[in-house]
Structures are given as structure tokens and as C-alpha cells.
């Protein structure tokens, strides 16, 4: 048998009692964080189920990774799923069949049963994540926890588990040529017990996303800050010799160029050719400048001008960064 199902659990005994009988065709690995709720007794009743109990560690992502690492069969096909029936076990055969051909398969939730405002938050978060991490832009449901892969197509050593969204880390460490398959499924209701999602989990997601972003957004921000000094410096040097409006144009454009050189080399590590990125970035920066000015002018009708300008700066920063990622330094090969 080459088909493995890895399930992280914390206090899921009631769910496991009903789930495990449905998984008789697979090698099941349960990674339990010492729930002490009868999980061990239930698992003991199934020959195809291996239970790993972790006493000193907690966390969904690290549980998944430690379960996967116990698989020695290099030909293995592995599917990761939750124990609470939100991930439809009937889809497992489709996963394993896809993995004959594809290196990776992920479940994409069809209809999300959640209040409208939560949907908006979730979709916004998803878009932000997609801007920050180019590699997952093609994935329809990047926050999914239901996914599978051929063991020989992922570099497990590259995976640093934090938080909940372990699938992101697997995709980042997928072999270059591996094909990815989407499998749609209906996201169910949790059968028993309650979700372990917490505020800390959100913070973990932020940390994880920043890491998978290689901290480019932070470097980009520092570069922007350096541009302010360049801008002011050039204005200071020129102001005695030229009319002010020309001084401001030259100083702004100079800072756009120094920002470009720094971003090209450090933030985006020359991931596209200079002659393509330079005109595009210039365009983005000028558009960003207009956004900044327009927002500041408009808001200053209602609020203090410095605050208005600050909001303009923040919006323009987000705009500049997003367009740098998806336009100026867009590289579909990564
Ligand atoms: N070992 C271990 N340790 N397992 C855990 C831990 C932990 O600290 N926290 C949660 N789990 C297990 C749960 O027992 C369950 O089997 C699974 O991980 C998912 O936990 P839930 O608490 O049900 O998470 P959720 O429903 O909020 O979110 C899940 O579904 C999302 C949508 O697919 C997760 O899988 C998310 O990653 C996923 O995005
Ligand atoms: Mn759940």
C-alpha cells in the first residue's frame, strides 16, 4: 500500500471513532498532541492506523510535518486532512488518483458557509497573501488544509512549520516541474468538538506569510524611506539654482531611480530584466505619487493635513508595493 493519510489531531476522539472506519483502504497516520481523550484506544482498534503521540510539542503544522517525516516509502502518495469531517473523506480516492499524474493536489472549498463580513475578510486576506507570495498566485484556495502530494516531489527539509497553514509551506517546497491539480469539495460542518483556531494562530499566519515573502515588503519599505532622504537631499542641493517646481520634479525622479536600483538588486534580487522593470517601476512610482497627492488633498478637507498626507503615503506604499510585485517585477516562472 502506497497511499497514506496524515491527520493531525487534538481532542478529536469522537470524530476519529466515525472517521477511521471510512479509511480502511489507506495507511493512516494520526499525529496527536497528547489529547488524553481516548484517541489512543480508538486508534488501537485499527491495524492500518499508526498513532504518534507528541508530548512536548503543539501545533497543527508541525504535527503534519512530523507525521509525514515518518513515511519511509519514497514512492508514497500522501494526503493531509483534518479529523473533524470538514474535509470530505469521500474525496480521498480522487486525491490519490490525481497523484498518479500530478505532483500535488489541493482541495478547494466550493461554497463557504460563513457570514458575509467574514467572507470579505477572508477574501481580502487571501488576495494580500497572493500578492506577497508569487508562487501561490495560481492556487484557488491557498488557505486550504486538505491537500496531497507525491513524497518524492517535495523537499521536506525546506519546510519550517509554523501555525496552521502548512499547505503554503509544502507548495513553496515543491519540485520545479511538479504539476498541481485542484479538487473541488464541499467544506463541511465540524461534527464534534470545537475549532482550535485562535488569535495566536492569526499572528502565526502573519509571521509565516512574511517569511514566505522573504521579507520583501519590509525591505521595500526601508528602500522607500531611503528615498525620502535622497529626495530631500537633492532638493536641498538644487534649490538655490533652479525654480522650485523643477527642483521637486528632479528630486522626486532621482529618488525614484535610487529606489529602483535598491529594489531591483535587494528587494526583488533581479528576478526580471532591468530594461523591463525600470520603465514599469517608474510608471508605478509616478502613479503612486499621484495617489498620494490626491488622497492627501481630498482628506485634508476633513482632517488635519499631516494625518491626511500620512494616510496618502500609506495607501501609495501599498499600491507601489503590490504593483511592483505583480507588474514591475512580475516573473511568472517563480
Ligand atoms: N496535533 C495537533 N496539534 N492537531 C491539531 C492542533 C494541534 O495543536 N490544532 C488543531 N489540530 C487538528 C484538529 O484536531 C483538526 O483535526 C485539524 O487540526 C484542524 O483543526 P481545526 O481546529 O478544526 O481547524 P479549522 O477548522 O479552524 O481550520 C482547518 O480547516 C481550514 C480550511 O480547510 C485547518 O485545516 C486549516 O488549516 C484550514 O485552512
Ligand atoms: Mn475544522
Image (cartoon, rainbow, N blue to C red):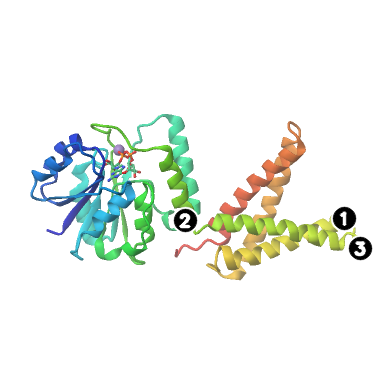
Comes first in the chain, label 3 or label 2: 2
- Residue 22 appearing in the image: no
Q: CA distance from mark 3 to mark 1?
A: 9 Å
Q: Nearer the viewer, mark 2 or mark 1?
A: 2
The residue under label 3 is 241
The residue under label 1 is 244
* Spot occupied by residue 303 in the image (x, y as percentages of width and height): 73, 32
Q: Is residue 68 above or below residue 35?
A: below
154 left or right of 290 in image: left
* Residue 65 in which image quadrant: bottom left
Q: Which residue sits at x=13%, y=44%? A: 43
Say which quadrant the C terminus sits in: bottom left
Q: Are marks 3 and 2 in contact (CB under 8 Å)?
A: no
Q: CA distance from mark 2 to mark 1?
A: 43 Å
Which structural element holds mark 3? Answer: loop
Q: Which residue sits at x=43%, y=58%? A: 135
The residue under label 2 is 211
* Spot occupied by residue 221 in the image (x, y as percentages of width and height): 62, 54
Please give the count of numbered marks on the rendered protein: 3
- Residue 174 appearing in the image: yes
Q: Nearer the viewer, mark 3 or mark 2?
A: 2
Amino acid at each position: 500500500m502506497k497511499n497514506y493519510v496524515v491527520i493531525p489531531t487534538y481532542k478529536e476522539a469522537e470524530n476519529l471513532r466515525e472517521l477511521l472506519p471510512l479509511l480502511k483502504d489507506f495507511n493512516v497516520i494520526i499525529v496527536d498532541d497528547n489529547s488524553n481523550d481516548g484517541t489512543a484506544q480508538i486508534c488501537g482498534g485499527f491495524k492500518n492506523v499508526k498513532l504518534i503521540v507528541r508530548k512536548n510539542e503543539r501545533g497543527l503544522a508541525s504535527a503534519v510535518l512530523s507525521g509525514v517525516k515518518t513515511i519511509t516509502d519514497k514512492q508514497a502518495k500522501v494526503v493531509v486532512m483534518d479529523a473533524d469531517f470538514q474535509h470530505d473523506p469521500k474525496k480521498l480516492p480522487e486525491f490519490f488518483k490525481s497523484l498518479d499524474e500530478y505532483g500535488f493536489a489541493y482541495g478547494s472549498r466550493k461554497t463557504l458557509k460563513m457570514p458575509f463580513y467574514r467572507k470579505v475578510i477572508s477574501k481580502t486576506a487571501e488576495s494580500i497573501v497572493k500578492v506577497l507570495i508569487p508562487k501561490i498566485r495560481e492556487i484557488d484556495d491557498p488557505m486550504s488544509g486538505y491537500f496531497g502530494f507525491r513524497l518524492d516531489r517535495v523537499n521536506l527539509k525546506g519546510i519550517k512549520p509554523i501555525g496552521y497553514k502548512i499547505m503554503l509551506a509544502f507548495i513553496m517546497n515543491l519540485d520545479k516541474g511538479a504539476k498541481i491539480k485542484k479538487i473541488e469539495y464541499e467544506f463541511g460542518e465540524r461534527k464534534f468538538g470545537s475549532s482550535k483556531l485562535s488569535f495566536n494562530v492569526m499572528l502565526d499566519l502573519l509571521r509565516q506569510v512574511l517569511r514566505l515573502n522573504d521579507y520583501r515588503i519590509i525591505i521595500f519599505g526601508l528602500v522607500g524611506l531611503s528615498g525620502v532622504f535622497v529626495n530631500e537631499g537633492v532638493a536641498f542641493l538644487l534649490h538655490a539654482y533652479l525654480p522650485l517646481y523643477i527642483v521637486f520634479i528632479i528630486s522626486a525622479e532621482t529618488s525614484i531611480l535610487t529606489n529602483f536600483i535598491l529594489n531591483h538588486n535587494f528587494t526583488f534580487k533581479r528576478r526580471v530584466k532591468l530594461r523591463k522593470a525600470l520603465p514599469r517601476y517608474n510608471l508605478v512610482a509616478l502613479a503612486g505619487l499621484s495617489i498620494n497627492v490626491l488622497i492627501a488633498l481630498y482628506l485634508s478637507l476633513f482632517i488635519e493635513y499631516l494625518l491626511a498626507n500620512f494616510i496618502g503615503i500609506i495607501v501609495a506604499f501599498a499600491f507601489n508595493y503590490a504593483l511592483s510585485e505583480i507588474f514591475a517585477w512580475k516573473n511568472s516562472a517563480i
